[in-house]
Amino acid sequence: MRNGAMEQAMEQTILTAISAVGFPIVVTFYLLTRFQRSMDNLTDKIGELIKELQRH
């Protein structure tokens, strides 16, 4: 699927979700998934820091 087609499909999916469950729910889901990725990244970095500190 081309990039433009993917973007259009994503927009359609978002619009369908908004019409099905409502804008606040979709925004909450989006923010929670972004927050989860940030927490996963933070957890990985803390693990790397712990390993580095244990080496010294």
Image (tube, grey):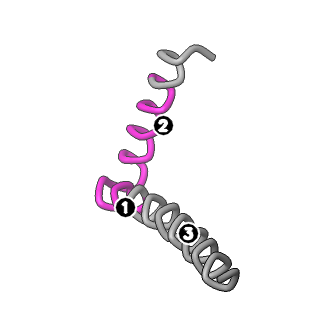
Is 16 covered by the magenta stretch? yes
Which residue is at the far left? Answer: 24
Residue positioned 37% across, 61% down in the render: 25
Q: Earlier in the sequence, mark 2 or mark 1?
A: 2
- How far apart in space, not on screen, are marks 1 and 3 (Cα)? 30 Å
Q: Secondary structure at mark 2?
A: helix
Is 21 covered by the magenta stretch? yes
Relative to the observer, which residue lies in front, 5 or 56? Answer: 56
Q: Which residue is mark 1?
A: 25
Residue positioned 38% across, 38% down in the render: 15
Residue 26 against residue 55 in the figure, above or below? above
Residue 30 against residue 43 in the figure, above or below? above
Magenta-colored segment: predominant secondary structure = helix
Q: Which residue is mark 3?
A: 45
Q: Please identify the quadrant where the C terminus is shown.
A: bottom right
Q: Quadrant of residue 31?
A: bottom left
